[in-house]
Structure formats: C-alpha cells, structure tokens
Image (spheres, rainbow, N blue to C red):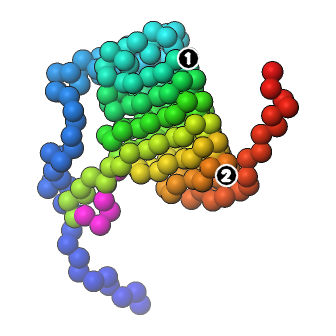
Amino acid sequence: MVEPRMQTPAIDLGTFDSSSLDRERSRPFEVLWWLFKLVFIQSAFPWPPSFKRLILIAFGAKIGRHVNLRPGINIHFPWKLRLGDNVWIGDRCTILNLEPVTMQSNSALAHEVYLAAAGHDITSPTFSYANKPITICSGAWIGTRAYIGPGVTVNQHAVVAAGSVVTKDVEAWQVVGGVPAKRISTRNIDWRRQH
C-alpha cells in the first residue's frame, strides 16, 4: 500500500504576483514592439538582417556589427538584449529575456534554440519568478533545439550539443550534451584550417 504524502500547501496560481518584474518599458511601448516583432522579426519572410538589426536597436537592443538574424526569431524584450559583433541567431530561436541576455562576439545559436532567462520557483506556492540573466560568451556555439536555463553562462568557445538541456554553467572549451547536459569532450580548433 502506498503511503499518502504529507499535507502540503496547495499551489495557488491565482496569487501569482507579476509586479516584481521590472519590464523597463511602458505597456504601450511593449505593444508597439509586439507589432514590429510579428511583422519583421518573428516573420518567416527573410527580411535583411541589417534591417532587423536597425529595428531591434530602435527598440533598445545593443547590437554590434555583422549580426546574422535568421527568420522566425522570437525576442521577448529587445531592450534587455546585448549582441556583440559577428553573432549568429538561427531560424525560429526564442530569447525569453525577462532578465538580460548577452551574446558576446562570434557566438552562435543554431536553429530553434531556447534561451530562458525566465522561470518560476518550484518551491513557491505562489509560483514566484526565478528569473536570472544568461550569457553566451565569445566563440560559443549552441546546437539546434538546445535549452539554456536561467542564470547560465556558456563560457568562451564552449559547444552545447543539439537537443541538450543546460541548467548549469559550461566551462570554456568544453563540449556538453544530453538531458541534463554533461561534459562530452574538449573542443579543439584546427587553426590551420582558416580560409
């Protein structure tokens, strides 16, 4: 016979309080962003990356040069987004950045990557926020359909394998993969293969 669990307080989503989130912009500004996002950023139409870059900058993003922004990208708050030079963001990536997301120069997201700088505290009966910034350091590469959780830093030149779930920092030059992600190997770059 299975013993009943101890009586615990019930989760009450009706008591969730979103006022702790610093949105940093007014609601009308957010609505305007959502309209531009749907037409130009999240659209499957291949608008030129340079054009999308200008729109994101107009909405507060800090973006370097030669950034490749593919179709279908979903960016929650562009004013909490920092992209260095030569950053690549693949088709249909989602950047849920209730806290800042930074991608340093020469970092890349493959297709359908999910960066979640937002979440909820599973120990909270009110499901309170557990949002933390994400940093993808220079030279790092995040594989297709990988998930990067709140508070994670993927350090320089690290690689996250496709389909991985990353909830802890990834050391520089490490290749990680799996659910949850674990170290697979060390990345070695053949500098002789430069073109």
Q: Amino acid at mark 2?
A: Gln
Identify the residue position indicated by label 1 in the image: 66
Between residues 48 and 87, which one lies in front from this camera angle?
87
Reply above or below: 164 against 139: below
The location of residue 38, given as percent across then percent down, is 36, 18
Give the residue type at disc 1: His
Side of 95 relative to 158 (left or right): left
Q: Quadrant of the N terminus?
A: bottom left
Residue under the image location 67 percent in, 52 percent down: 174
What range is drawn magenta here? Answer: 119-124
User: SS class of the residue under badge 1?
Assistant: loop
Which residue does the image show at 52% across and 40% down from the upper left?
Answer: 136
Q: From the viewer's perspective, is residue 176 above or below residue 29?
A: below
Residue at the outermost bottom position: 1
Q: Secondary structure at mark 2?
A: strand
The residue beneath circle 2 is 174
